[in-house]
């Protein structure tokens, strides 16, 4: 019964008032939706909570809630008309621009996700601009860099220049974002920057990818060049031949650390307009990309990427000390990481 009600309320949530309805009605629908959100949160949380075992997986619930809230944001209020110094927007000057930032961690599919976004004719996602230390030295150098990006004056290979309808970049949590979160959150709100959180559920897979990637930095398995992302099955095969050893002594603590960081980021930026994406969901279901395009106020397009996944198949094939890792995680909240795909 309660379960039915929860689903009923979830459905009601996505009802949008007709655009031309009287103000009073729109307000009423809006108020009702807000009450519903609170209702779901308090009544359904318990019921949903039994399905999820770790706190991190609770993000799923937040995800569903924010998706409903996102739908109520009035997009025209958060669009911009930048006037870049470095070029003229010409015939696209009357087109509005959405500002966004992808907040993610290394080896969580953000490179792949960004190539997908950049395949859209109206998206310019400028890569990891804060990987350069001077740009994240202090809050003022960060904000200056942001100003340049959102003024369309950041020129990179991804720039679509005059006809960008969404402009942004990807930002790793360990690139000054957490240290200066107060100033950045204030900036995001003041300039209506929309945040896309991109996380990976299976943190053990993320760990394998990180270890293999940092190994390749020195080993340079692909004919003497280091590659973090590949475009062919052969290259993926070569890179995945290296099997890292995972420190099983610190494994549980390390996984917990990764979770805590993601939770913190969510907390810091929870009052910005945002959506939460999971790498695994994107892999399984490409239609999720339509949600992203809707979130960014873009005309819908088929998005494509040439990148190929490096570590495929069961994790036991990719970890040298699999038995240790299996033993360490069996019976813990992380046990499912041993089995899951992607
Ligand atoms: C969130 O919504 C998806 C469908 O969009 C559903 O499959 C999933 O079970 C929901 N998660 C929770 C925790 O309610
Ligand atoms: C911030 O860092 C930049 C260089 O990255 C430096 O030029 C500037 O003086 C610094 N500002 C403050 C207030 O420390
Ligand atoms: C997208 O880009 C195309 C080609 O550059 C342009 O004609 C169109 O107006 C742009 N659309 C938006 C919504 O900016
Ligand atoms: C490495 O070099 C050889 C010979 O030059 C070439 O055939 C092969 O395709 C290269 N492999 C990769 C992964 O680039
Ligand atoms: C594994 O982790 C433990 C605990 O953090 C540490 O003491 C040990 O040196 C690590 N072992 C290796 C090989 O890095
Ligand atoms: C956002 O995070 C703050 C703590 O930093 C918390 O007090 C607040 O309840 C959170 N809001 C939402 C909507 O989760
Ligand atoms: C795929 O994602 C779309 C958009 O979020 C959703 O509507 C659909 O139900 C999903 N399909 C599956 C099989 O999960
Ligand atoms: C983990 O170890 C147990 C006991 O040895 C075994 O039954 C199980 O299949 C292993 N799990 C995986 C995913 O290899």
Image (cartoon, helix red, strand yellow):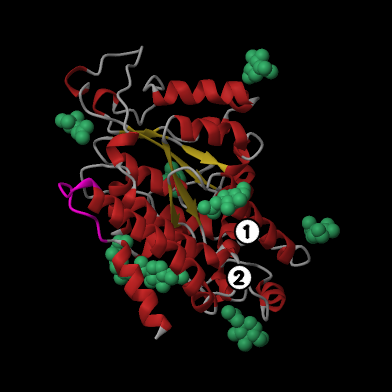
Taking the view exactly as shown, the residue that stands out farthest to the bottom is 1
| Residue name at image x 32 percent, y 50 percent | 72
Q: Is mark 2 within 8 Å of ligand 1?
A: no
Q: Is residue 316 magenta?
A: no
Which residue is identified by label 2? 54
Q: Nearer the viewer, residue 306 or 261?
A: 261
Question: Residue 82 at x, y = what percent?
Answer: 33, 21
Q: CA distance from mark 2 to mark 1?
A: 10 Å
Which dot marks residue 259? 1
Taking the view exactly as shown, the residue that stands out farthest to the front is 24
Figure quadrant of residue 323:
bottom right
Segment tinted magenta in the rendering:
15-23
| Residue name at image x 35 percent, y 68 percent | 10
Which dot marks residue 277? none
Tell me the crowding category of disc 2: few under 14, some 14 to 19, or many 20 or more residues within 10 angstroms, Cα based.
few
Residues at discs 2 and 1 in contact (Cβ within 8 Å) = yes
| Among numbered discs 2 and 1, the one appearing first in the sequence | 2
Figure quadrant of residue 50:
bottom right
| Residue name at image x 33 percent, y 43 percent | 117
| Residue name at image x 24 percent, y 27 percent | 163
């Amino acid at each position: 019964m309660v379960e039915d009600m929860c689903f009923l309320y979830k459905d009601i949530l996505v009802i949008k008032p007709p655009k031309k309805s009287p103000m009073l009605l729109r307000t009423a629908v809006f108020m009702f939706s807000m009450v519903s959100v609170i209702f779901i949160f308090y009544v359904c949380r318990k019921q949903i909570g039994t399905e999820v075992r770790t706190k991190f997986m609770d993000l799923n619930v937040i995800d569903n809630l924010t998706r409903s809230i996102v739908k109520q944001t009035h997009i025209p209020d958060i669009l911009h008309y930048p006037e870049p110094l470095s070029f003229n927007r010409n015939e696209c000057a009357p087109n509005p621009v959405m500002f966004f930032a992808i907040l993610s961690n290394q080896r969580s599919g953000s490179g792949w996700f960004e190539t997908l976004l950049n395949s859209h004719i109206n998206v310019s996602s400028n890569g990891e601009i804060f990987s350069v230390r001077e740009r994240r030295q202090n809050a003022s150098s960060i904000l200056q860099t942001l100003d340049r990006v959102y003024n369309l004056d950041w020129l990179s290979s991804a720039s679509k220049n005059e006809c960008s309808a969404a402009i942004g970049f990807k930002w790793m949590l360990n690139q000054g974002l957490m240290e200066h979160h107060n100033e950045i959150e204030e900036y995001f709100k003041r300039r209506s920057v929309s945040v896309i959180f991109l996380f990976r559920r299976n943190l053990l897979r993320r760990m394998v990818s990180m270890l293999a990637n940092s190994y390749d930095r020195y080993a340079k398995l692909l004919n003497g060049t280091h590659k973090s992302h590949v475009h062919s099955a052969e290259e993926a095969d070569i890179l995945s031949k290296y099997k890292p050893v995972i420190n099983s002594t610190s494994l549980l603590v390390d996984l917990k650390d990764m979770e805590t960081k993601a939770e913190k980021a969510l907390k810091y930026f929870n009052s910005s307009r945002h959506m939460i994406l999971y790498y695994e969901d994107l892999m399984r279901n490409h239609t999720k990309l339509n949600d992203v395009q809707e979130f960014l106020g873009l005309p819908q397009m088929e998005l494509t990427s040439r990148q190929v996944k490096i570590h495929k198949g069961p994790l036991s094939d990719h970890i040298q000390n699999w038995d240790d890792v299996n033993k360490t995680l069996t019976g813990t909240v992380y046990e499912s990481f041993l089995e899951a795909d992607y």
